[in-house]
Image (cartoon, rainbow, N blue to C red):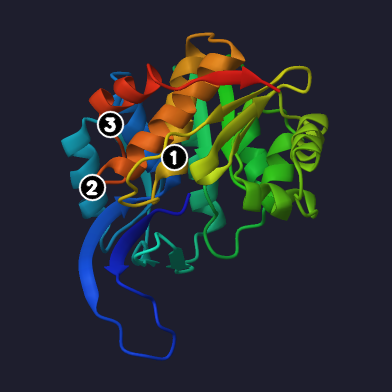
């Protein structure tokens, strides 16, 4: 719903109030759900991207999706897509400055819902991911979930009131990270027990499964009855941008295949880890994904 241009800048150190020298800079065109679509395609599955796109620079997003082999149907709006800046220092510390973007009219929002109805009717999985355009109420996420065909599995990756709005309609899988979980439930996560209790809270609100990203530590998945942990491998981190989207892409493919919780978790961690190892891109290679998937271990908790 809110595509963006990401400018990722690497620095030796990010010094507030001082001049900083750029080591490297990468420009990518995406947005959470578009990144997921690219990840799904790289895993060899077919997909279709939709959402809001902008007249001034939308053609650059189309070029990227064309190159990746991802078909798309966008609702076009005036203005430019958001421009976000991500600063990464030598410790792999990420500092983000995110744009707010353009306003979108109620008519355009209705057009998006109609497009979701059409596309989800021929899709086995529908992923709803990311933020909303400026001024759009969080309850719009409930409308998006309701627009999804009843035969399509629903995955949601957002947080706060947007997450709760979606959960009220029932969702097959949600993928928060720790910060997003804290933001959504309004509680601090201090222990493994807090973490699982927070996941159960999302399940009580309407999620069938929670895939919780723990960053470089790995991830947890639970359906409220069984819970599993997968530790990430200690790898060289080129960029954390898009890692969560890679995780959602792999989880979506496994969910479509009817895989059990441990396989969904292992696939998600493999894709997320492969993404952070990939230079200059916001997605992973299938070769690196397969290599990691065969190595990772899952344990019940």
Which residue does the image show at 22% across and 50% down from the upper left?
280
In the rendered structure, are the residues bearing label 3 and label 2 in contact, judged by CB atoms less than 8 Å apart?
no
Q: Nearer the viewer, mark 1 or mark 2?
A: 2
Q: Quadrant of residue 211?
A: top right
Between 164 and 120, the one nearer to me in the picture: 164
Which residue does the image show at 22% across and 65% down from the upper left?
25
- Specify which label sits upstream in the sequence, 1 or 2: 1
Q: Is residue 151 above or below residue 37?
A: above
Mark 2 surroundings within 10 Å by alpha-carbon count, few (fewer than 14), some (14 through 19), many (20 or more): few
Mark 1 surroundings within 10 Å by alpha-carbon count, few (fewer than 14), some (14 through 19), many (20 or more): many
Q: Quadrant of residue 91?
A: bottom left
Residue 245's tag is: 1
Between 145 and 129, the one nearer to me in the picture: 129
Q: Is residue 20 above or below residue 277?
A: below
Percent x, y for residue 181?
Answer: 69, 47
Percent x, y for residue 84?
Answer: 39, 65
In the rendered structure, are the residues bearing label 3 and label 1 in contact, judged by CB atoms less than 8 Å apart?
no
Reading the image, the residue beneath label 3 is: 71
- Specify which label sits upstream in the sequence, 3 or 1: 3
Mark 3 surroundings within 10 Å by alpha-carbon count, few (fewer than 14), some (14 through 19), many (20 or more): some
Q: Nearer the viewer, mark 3 or mark 2?
A: 2
Reading the image, the residue beneath label 2 is: 279
Q: Nearer the viewer, mark 3 or mark 1?
A: 1
* Separation of marks 1 and 2 at Cα, in angstroms: 16 Å
Element type where label 1 sits in the image? helix
Placement of the C terminus among the 4 image quadrants:
top right
Percent x, y for residue 36?
Answer: 40, 36
Between 76 and 19, the one nearer to me in the picture: 19
Between 226 and 301, the one nearer to me in the picture: 301
- Specify which label sits upstream in the sequence, 3 or 2: 3
Q: In this view of the protein, can residue 114 be seen by the observer?
A: yes
């Amino acid at each position: 719903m809110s595509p963006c241009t990401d400018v990722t800048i690497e620095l030796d150190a990010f010094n507030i109030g001082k001049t900083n020298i750029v080591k490297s800079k990468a420009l990518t065109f995406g947005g959470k759900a578009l990144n997921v679509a690219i990840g799904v395609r790289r895993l060899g599955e077919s997909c279709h991207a939709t959402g809001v796109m902008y007249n001034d620079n939308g053609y650059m997003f189309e070029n990227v999706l064309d190159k990746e082999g991802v078909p798309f149907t966008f609702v076009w709006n005036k203005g430019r897509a958001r421009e976000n800046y991500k600063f990464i220092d030598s410790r792999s510390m990420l500092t983000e400055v995110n744009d707010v973007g353009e306003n979108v009219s109620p008519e355009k929002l209705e057009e998006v819902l109609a497009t979701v109805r059409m596309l989800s009717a021929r899709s086995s999985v529908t992923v709803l991911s990311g933020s909303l355009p400026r001024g759009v109420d969080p309850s719009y996420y409930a409308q998006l979930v309701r627009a999804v065909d009843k035969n399509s599995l629903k995955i949601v990756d957002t947080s706060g009131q947007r997450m709760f709005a979606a959960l009220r309609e029932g969702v097959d899988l949600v993928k928060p990270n720790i910060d997003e979980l804290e933001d959504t439930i309004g509680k601090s996560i201090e222990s493994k027990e807090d973490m699982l209790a927070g996941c159960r809270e999302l399940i009580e609100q309407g999620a069938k499964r929670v895939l919780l990203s723990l960053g470089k530590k790995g991830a947890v998945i639970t359906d409220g009855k069984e819970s599993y942990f997968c530790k990430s491998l200690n790898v060289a981190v080129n960029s954390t941008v898009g890692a969560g989207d890679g995780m959602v892409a792999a989880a979506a493919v496994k969910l479509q295949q009817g895989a059990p919780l441990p396989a969904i978790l292992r696939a998600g961690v493999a894709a997320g880890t492969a993404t952070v190892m990939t230079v200059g891109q916001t997605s992973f290679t299938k070769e690196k994904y397969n290599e990691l998937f065969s190595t990772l271990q899952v344990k019940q908790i």
